[in-house]
Image (tube, coloured by chain):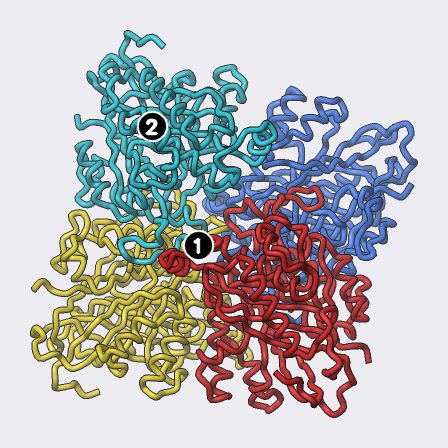
Chain colours: A blue, B red, C cyan, D yellow
Amino acid sequence: MPRPTAPRQLQVLRLSMAHPGDLSALAALLDAGRVRAEDVVAVIGKTEGNGGVNDFTRGYFTQSLMHLLGERLGRAPAELQRELPCVLSGGTEGVLSPHYCVFLRGAAAADAPAGPALAIGRAFSPPMPASEIGRWAQVRAVAAAVRAAMQDAGIDDPTEVRFVQLKGPCVTAARAAAALAAGQSVASADPNRSMALSRAAGAFGVALALGELADDPSLEPALLSRFDLWCARASVSTGVEVEANEVVLLGHSPHWRGPLRMACEPMADALDLPAIARVLTRLGLQATPQLGAQDRARVAAALVKCEPDRRGQVRGARHTMLDDTDINAQRHIRAAVGGLVAGALGDGRIFVSGGAEHQGPDGGGLIAVIAEAAA
Amino acid sequence: MPRPTAPRQLQVLRLSMAHPGDLSALAALLDAGRVRAEDVVAVIGKTEGNGGVNDFTRGYFTQSLMHLLGERLGRAPAELQRELPCVLSGGTEGVLSPHYCVFLRGAAAADAPAGPALAIGRAFSPPMPASEIGRWAQVRAVAAAVRAAMQDAGIDDPTEVRFVQLKGPCVTAARAAAALAAGQSVASADPNRSMALSRAAGAFGVALALGELADDPSLEPALLSRFDLWCARASVSTGVEVEANEVVLLGHSPHWRGPLRMACEPMADALDLPAIARVLTRLGLQATPQLGAQDRARVAAALVKCEPDRRGQVRGARHTMLDDTDINAQRHIRAAVGGLVAGALGDGRIFVSGGAEHQGPDGGGLIAVIAEAAA
Amino acid sequence: MPRPTAPRQLQVLRLSMAHPGDLSALAALLDAGRVRAEDVVAVIGKTEGNGGVNDFTRGYFTQSLMHLLGERLGRAPAELQRELPCVLSGGTEGVLSPHYCVFLRGAAAADAPAGPALAIGRAFSPPMPASEIGRWAQVRAVAAAVRAAMQDAGIDDPTEVRFVQLKGPCVTAARAAAALAAGQSVASADPNRSMALSRAAGAFGVALALGELADDPSLEPALLSRFDLWCARASVSTGVEVEANEVVLLGHSPHWRGPLRMACEPMADALDLPAIARVLTRLGLQATPQLGAQDRARVAAALVKCEPDRRGQVRGARHTMLDDTDINAQRHIRAAVGGLVAGALGDGRIFVSGGAEHQGPDGGGLIAVIAEAAA
Amino acid sequence: MPRPTAPRQLQVLRLSMAHPGDLSALAALLDAGRVRAEDVVAVIGKTEGNGGVNDFTRGYFTQSLMHLLGERLGRAPAELQRELPCVLSGGTEGVLSPHYCVFLRGAAAADAPAGPALAIGRAFSPPMPASEIGRWAQVRAVAAAVRAAMQDAGIDDPTEVRFVQLKGPCVTAARAAAALAAGQSVASADPNRSMALSRAAGAFGVALALGELADDPSLEPALLSRFDLWCARASVSTGVEVEANEVVLLGHSPHWRGPLRMACEPMADALDLPAIARVLTRLGLQATPQLGAQDRARVAAALVKCEPDRRGQVRGARHTMLDDTDINAQRHIRAAVGGLVAGALGDGRIFVSGGAEHQGPDGGGLIAVIAEAAA
């Protein structure tokens, strides 16, 4: 894609929903002419399901979104769905509030502050064969897609990339059976492990593209075992409905204008309030201990990855998340870390997602914030 | 009870458990002669149940505790249980860690810092008839017990009371039937509402004893309706196994020695990180934003009450706790507020309890911390 | 509506879904020309949500269905939704299998067996004001709609009505507030109680229309209190998305042809296997103890209402459904009764719905089966 | 153990509990002299926990039982616990009722019907090293314990064994670490898989002792893979608190007297109502379709093993148990199969346990019933 000559501008709208099929807030903005459907380049949101295999709030929201935009654009919803990344995390435990961030890419406003400013890029890898998922081939495919997304965003310097949201495929039982029938092996035929491996390969792929990791296939066994290897700018989810690696990349580019900036910090564990303070400080926001009203109004989005520590302890104190037959461990940790981040920001509209393998330190994760620069 | 002439000292041990029947940490201290069974005056803890009606981890822990202490004291466990307050909150959601605080009352150590220091007192009201539960009669009975506990603690000035933990009775279906058969009415025959009414009456009773509320029976309808009336030093739980109002009172007394101090702050809502900072500051602890290792070592206990906001929003953002058929709303809020407080303190051993009606602001609650004074 | 002169025929298709947005089975039949979209008069199904307030699988399925049929009929999905009853019960606990029954009404096939045969009728009451919900006005409105549905079905004799599926409105918090602001009272402002009252009024309304109950407004207090009053041919659900009372009525009519017949039996409690045997026997099916393959193939649909006994016991043995903080009581009972009915029928595709107030005996419910007459 | 010359008699008491610490029914019988504490040889029960790793109702009940019997026998509870098998299954989903069966072994009453009659035997294997769990060494150890229990029961003919309840150890994380440190391998270090392997080895061990399987170590890989190998008389549970294989064996012996008889049948799947009918018929009980009051009074205990079919379907219809993030699959299946069995027996006091690997057909399980012979 040739680099555009006209400066571009990213807008991020954080909208609330009354239920997972409620796109009325976006519809109203489209109706009022304040948003153009063709400017929507990605949606990242939290829906109020359980976040597990049988969480259908993600599918419901996606169907509703694609119908809405498809109608406005005169396009088939199913076709649009293959082009427009819609990354959803189910589970609004505790104080988390169902919401979605709409990323709009358009020509810079005449009075937009000069760049460098926050830019967005997208890319899709080719569909992954089941035999490559969770292996080095996926690591490389993700890395290539991340590089393509950097180019799409107009970012040359990997250090200027702030955050990569990836949605990767996994090996369903059906895909595993087909691969085996075709004489191919799969990294794991267990769907849950396959999802974890795909997240791990995604994190490695981002690290590879950003120059944090060598392209060394002998590292394949490090997936899900060497948790000292991690990338704090990668946020990966997987979905059975996806066949390619879908990348939404955010970073600073001199070719973009506007007030938006982004920062990202690793979280050492589920109690890492200092990391939250650091990411805010880097954006010129003051949490003392909580953002004030003015700073709060500057925040456009907050994205968090976290994990119930697999060793059963947080700072030496036993936790019970992993042994709870009643509440899934990911629901526990989203509630806890969501409560912490929401408390620092003074706002429950936080994207908090589990499954943070290699996405930040083991037992911790990462926090990324988009905010307007101080005037 | 005559005031003791010899100065006393409170110790608080915060011990971990491997499961709800695990008292091995206390047993080891008893075995080693580091704790005397007769000094144990109260236990407050968090067990890893669901915190609901069918949470039997509280009964299991209590039985184990009473067997342990009964054996050491040569007393029947059932008898001991009627004298020793054991207040448990089920539910260690998220990063919360199962633990129990043992309150020991003994003669002050020779080298104990001079008072005023943190003191403890206990008292039991007479058994409450079902017809009085959730009514002004209970408010007055609680107030009388609180005053008795102040006397037991050697505290004359209500403003020196820092925290009152109350365990109150409720109207079970059986008690309601018996009352009705005897020609008496009950405030509510619905067990859940009866528990809430009992908590409300308990909070009012504490407020009455502490001089924050008038002894005005016309306020009875304010129970569970006038949520602008609250006491930020009252923490109330109810139990079907209890017939009296059991009071554990903590506050500063010139007759006690030692390094322990306590502070308590109302929390305006589930995001009130500033309140957490304030309570720590009052104890000379610095959360910038999190307690450092030295300050953390000074904390002996942290106790929190909280609520899923009944209006369905936190600071204008919709939450989904009240409509979740899969996870009880109290489990949600404990996880979220527990995550926030644990993040500020750097420690998951927090007593977080739901059911905060009139115990702090509506939709919020309170936080109390016991810590050693700086050397 | 004038009675059609040409004989009609009902077809019931029982289709499986892979997830709540999966209408592919119906789409394939439409594509193949085996089903005409304009013949679809009602859909009753079970989706794999939790069956509670936050079960969005019902909305997701409904949206998917209306999009599919709307596209085929050239009509707006939202408009279609106001005309086509789609009654869904969330929760496929245990062996229950997600499925939906499509009711098709068309001209009788030339070789269709002569009637009387199973007929279907539909009717909608006018939208109910919030002030009338759960009151005698709703009882009468439902009765009028049931009579209209009888006429639509071509059934004159109320004893020939076999089953009435009703979907009624409830008082949401918003509707309650609006009613109060307009100076009106509501039967209950508590959404859960309002839903129960609406189901109760619906059951009374069916009973009134079928001649089982007098039109006596002094019976209004009997709603949710006199559980000795019940109708074993009424199955009622409520939904926040509904404003009118939507009726789907099934019964035998001489104006219809075809092999389908229906029977319905009250269930005395959750263990009432004899009732299941009775309803099958009335249709000429033999469960000895389970339907054989041939009889199983004749079954077109099975619909069940049930309740966790509110007195805490089933036949003198304590159950724990009502006190379980982890699993909603309705999920418990659907799993248990679903297991029982599925065992007798040898098939997990059973519509099992909770909330059976006045719909069959207290603590029990009812079972209805549609089957082809023996050749 | 020398065979006793005096005829013995088994009594089975089925008692209800109000909560998992409630042994009052047994205490009352002991107080009244109707039960002698020294006659209690085993307890099998269902408690109202979640049946998972964090189900502490089993420990609570066990502690309460051992305290009660220890007090009556003048023995330490911990010591008694190592001798008296107490097999508990958590989870009283749906209509299942919390209860426990007390097995009493004593001299035959003078007027007891002549044998052969139902006999009971117990045996414990030596403690299993972690390295042997889930391997052929465990299969053989279980077989040896089963043979010892046959001898204890006075049963020579393996075909007269009706039911073997086994409680086996598993590899906890701590035991795995210790074994690895000692240079030993474990079959699996994953606790959940280790539990399944231990159940599988237990079932194989019972089959070996009963002559249904060859002592062929090359079959070790068949554990958890060859599900065509199963024993319909083996019911196995595992517990982290157990180190040995504990066997409770029931069967018919000419050396015993009394009216009790037992039968056991494999269940082909979760809908196998005919199997339930068969097991009742073998005991002379008539379920047409449900036991009548007289037959019901003859039933002393019912024990069931079952599984959510791991292939995701029951008789071709998709089930959703395995993909439910909110409710554990074992809770689903217990509710469903419990509902079916309770419906056939007319009683919710059924022991229903999941984890049925190799204990009955794949996807099914087994049902065993103890009843008095017809007079």
Q: How many numbered dots are placed on residues in this image?
A: 2
Badge 1 sits on which subunit? Answer: B
Residue B266, image x, y percentages:
72, 59
Q: Is residue A204 visible?
A: no
What residue appears at the point 16 percent right and 52 percent down from the top-left corner? Answer: D292
Q: Does residue A289 appear in this view?
A: yes
* Residue at (79% x, 47% y) in the render: A162
Q: Quadrant of the C terminus of chain B?
A: bottom right
Which callout, 1 or 2, points to the residue nearer the camera?
1
Relative placement, left or right, of A110 versus C344 is right
In this view of the protein, which residue sits in the foreground, B168 or C2? Answer: B168
Residue C186: numbered disc: none
Residue marked by disc 1: B185
- Mark 1 crowd level (few <14, some 14–19, many ≥20, 10 Å Cα): some
Rendered image: mark on residue C216: 2
Residue C239 position within the rendered picture, expressed as x and y whole percent measured from the top left: 48, 33
Quarter of the image with the N terminus of chain B in it:
bottom right
Which residue is at 55% across, 79% downward?
D181
